[in-house]
Amino acid sequence: MSTTLKCISPIDGSVFAERPFLSPDKARQAADRARTAQKDWAARPLSERIALVQAGVARVGEMNDEIVPELAHQMGRPIRYGGEFGGFNERATYMASIAEEALAPIKLEDSASFKRYIRRVPHGVVLVVAPWNYPYMTAINTVAPALIAGNTVILKHASQTPLVGERMARAFHEAGVPQDAFQNVFMDHATTSDLISQRAFDFVNFTGSVGGGQAIERAAAGTFTGVGLELGGKDPGYVMDDADLDAAVDTLIDGAMFNSGQCCCGIERIYVAENLFDAFVEKAVAIVSAYKLGNPLDPETTLGPMAAVRFAQEVRAQTSEAIAQGARALIDPALFPQDDGGAYLMPQILVDVTHQMRVMRDESFGPVVGIMPVRDDAHAVELMNDSDFGLTASLWTRDTARAEAIADRIETGTVFMNRADYLDPGLCWTGCKSTGRGGGLSVIGYHNLTRPKSYHLKKA
């Protein structure tokens, strides 16, 4: 087993960063330090914890000029999009703004006889296992509220984005968060699983693959350690007969292709009312055909490489299988000579697709989308629910009541109307079915990062 983490840059296949994994003993020591530090960290006033987290977030923003090209090297996102600090800051700022109310005691009685109330108390040590696709925004979803709530945090970032955890820890330490209260670590899968099974952590938040989530649950089995899991997705868009067609095409195709399709809530399948289908497809093909695939360090590039060759190969496999089964590919490969058969993958739109094809059932997580016509709302709901996943769904109509009625029938975590691929920090970020369990952000995010503790005090 390797003792070293290597980040292979999708730009050219070179080793961009290399870090040694902690030994099992060193990893256990890190967890023990976090546990020792937690009581002092939780004892600080809530206002102080909020201020320190906000200062850490601001310090990350000051590093943005260095972060943007680093992200391009690590996972391939074009520099023209400027990184993630906008969403990173929005989420942390919102969670800071609601902390006092979200964590306030629930008061039942304060009479001459009794004082009764429920407090929210921190779990203790929270392990955050973060993904590479939006490495700053996905990490801050848990890091900020966990620290604010009085937990200490150990961050284990994806091997594709090792510099992200280092930068976040450095920024927060420079802002005054104690080093043992927020640690970035490099651990292999076996060490991580062993520590979870040994109850080294009191809560584990994981964002990643279904297989990874299953491994986390297996490691935690019997320990009663809480887990939050955001796993795979196959998010649908549904364009109804009364939709604003131009807005629907622009948003859904961007949701399918941005970040080379590597978005947790990216659009992976689109259902369009029969009367709008041909026009939708024509407009979608025009948009995608104008993309520029290339080196993400080039400001003109709109579509960078996928984060790893193996991810691109899975998308190619799904696409070629669908074509062999009767799907039609509408994007001309001649427009994308940069597709090298490796990490640089051209975008593709497929029609004549069915749910017997993997591209309409398995998570693709790449720049390919299948588009199907639907007869009516019932047909669309049937197809949207015909999935093992349930993260988000995007509905396009001018009729709010119609959208709400359809939303009630969709098996998903979040329903959008006339938008897509956005995480609102005021709403719970959650999923169902194989997408996982638990919920982040919003008031519910604080509830999941704390436990209730009841006080029943009889006065003398």
Image (tube, rainbow, N blue to C red):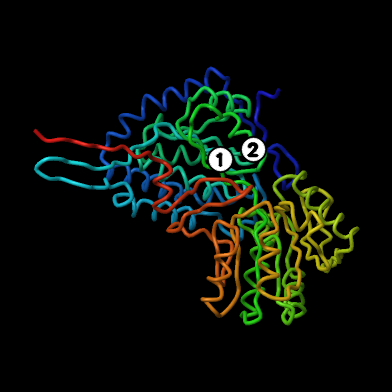
Q: Is residue 333 left or right of residue 403?
A: right
**Front one among 182 and 236:** 236
Density class for disc 2 (Cα within 10 Å; few <14, some 14-19, many ≥20) is some
Label pair 2/1, CB-CB below 8 angstroms? yes
For disc 2, the marked residue is 212
Which mark is drawn over residue 452?
none
**Front one among 380 and 446:** 380
Residues at marks 2 and 1, CA–CA distance in whole angstroms: 8 Å
SS for tag 2? helix
Residue at the image position 48 percent from the left and 33 percent from the top: 154
Residue 34 visible? The answer is yes
Name the amino acid type tagged 1: Phe
Q: Position of residue 136 (x, y in %)?
A: 53, 47
Residue at the image position 33 percent from the left and 38 percent from the top: 121
Quarter-of-image position of residue 256: bottom right
Q: Is residue 309 left or right of residue 215?
A: right
Name the amino acid type tagged 2: Gly
Residue 70 visible? The answer is no
Density class for disc 1 (Cα within 10 Å; few <14, some 14-19, many ≥20) is many
Q: Position of residue 303 (x, y in %)?
A: 70, 59
Q: Quadrant of the N terminus?
A: top right
For disc 1, the marked residue is 206
The tag earlier along the polypeptide, 2 or 1, is: 1
Quarter-of-image position of residue 36: top left
Q: Quadrant of the C terminus?
A: top left
Q: How many numbered marks appear?
A: 2
Residue at the image position 85 percent from the left and 58 percent from the top: 322
Q: Is residue 329 left or right of residue 213?
A: right
**Front one among 112 and 450:** 112
Q: Position of residue 165 (x, y in %)?
A: 53, 39
SS for tag 1? strand
